[in-house]
Image: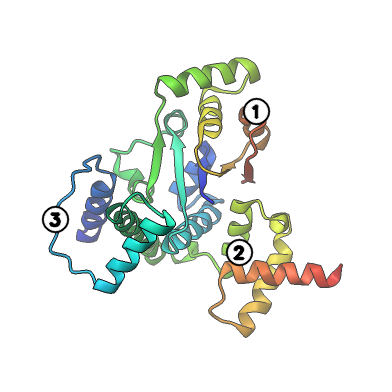
Amino acid sequence: MSRIILLDNEAVQALGTPGHPKHRRLIAHAQVVARRKARTLPISVAIPTAVRVEAGWDRTNSAWAFVNQLRIADVPLGTKHADAAAAIRKRTGVSVADAHLGAAIQGAESDHVTVITSDPRDMRAAAEGRHIDVVTI
Amino acid sequence: MPADDQVLDRINELLDSPDLETTNTSMRIPNALREAAALAVRELGVAPSTTVLTSNALRAALEAVVMQAVLDRHYERYPQTRPALADLAIAAAELDGHPLAGQPELIRRSAGEVQQRHPDASPEDVLLWAEALTSAAA
C-alpha cells in the first residue's frame, strides 16, 4: 500500500528551520520516511508548488539546501491541477495554496494520503471527502 | 560547498533525471538472483520486466541512502534535533493515522518500556507494545 505525504506551509517552515519549535517533530517524520524507504516501502513526500511559493522555498537558494536534499518532490500547478484547484477554491473558499493542496490530495494516485499541516480544518475542506490522515502540527 | 554535499546533490540530480535511456552495464549479478528476479516478474507479475524490477529496487535503495545521509549530517550539525525512539514511534503513528496517534504519552511510556528490554527496538515495535497495553487494559 503506497502513501504520499503532503506538506503545508508551516510544515515546510518547520522542517527547514532548525530553530523552529516544531523542527524536531518534522525531522522525526522525515526519519520515519527514510526508514521506510530503506525497507523499500512505497512512500514519498511532496509539496504542491503553490505551497512552496507561499513558504518562500526557492530551490536555487542555499538557505534551503537541507530541505532540497530530502527528496521532497514538487506537485506542479499544471493545467489539470490549476483547473481542479480553481474549482476547489470556488467551492470551499480555501486559499490558493490550500486549493492546490486539495487538488494534489484529490489527484493523488497513492493508496493513502497524509497531510502535515497547522490547519487541519482547511485541509479537510480542501480534500472534499477524500480520506486523508492529518498530522496537526 | 563541502564535497559530501556535492555528492548528495549529484545523486539527487541523477535520481530526478527524466532520462530513461538504458544501457548495458558491466554490473555482475549472481545467476541465482537473476533467475529469481525473472521468475518473480514472469510468474508473480511484480514488475513489467526484470530491468524495471532491478531499477526500482536500486532507486529505492539510493533514495533511502541519500535521505539517511542528509539526516545524519543534520544530526551531526544539530545533535538536539535527533529524534528519540518515542518521537519516531509517535511520528510513525501520526503518518499512518494509527488509532494511538492521539495518545503520545502512552507511546512515550511504551517506548521507554520496550527500550529497556530491546535497545534496538523499532518505532513499529513500540506501537505494537502500546497496542498490547491498551488491549490488556480493555
- Distance between the Cα atoms at labels 1 and 3? 47 Å
Its colouring scheme is: rainbow
Horizontal side of B16 relative to A90 (left or right) equals: left
Q: Which residue is mark 3?
A: B24
* Most distant residue in the bottom direction: B117
Q: Residues within 10 Å of mark 3 (few under 14, many from 20)?
A: few
Q: Nearer the viewer, residue B128 or A74?
A: B128
- Residue at 51 percent across and 41 percent down: it is A6
Q: Which residue is mark 1?
A: A128
Looking at the rendered image, the disc whose residue lies closer to the viewer, 2 or 3, is: 3
* Quarter of the image where one finds residue B77: bottom left
- Is disc 2 placed on a helix, strand or loop? helix
Amino acid found under the numbered disc labelled 3: Asn
Q: Are marks 2 and 3 in contact (CB under 8 Å)?
A: no
- Residue at 40 percent across and 60 percent down: it is B71
Horizontal side of B71 relative to A96 (left or right) equals: left
- Distance between the Cα atoms at labels 1 and 2? 29 Å
- Residue at 66 percent across and 33 percent down: it is A124
Chain letter for the residue marked with disc 3 in the picture = B
- Is disc 3 placed on a helix, strand or loop? loop
Q: Nearer the viewer, residue B114 or B32?
A: B32
Chain letter for the residue marked with disc 1 in the picture = A
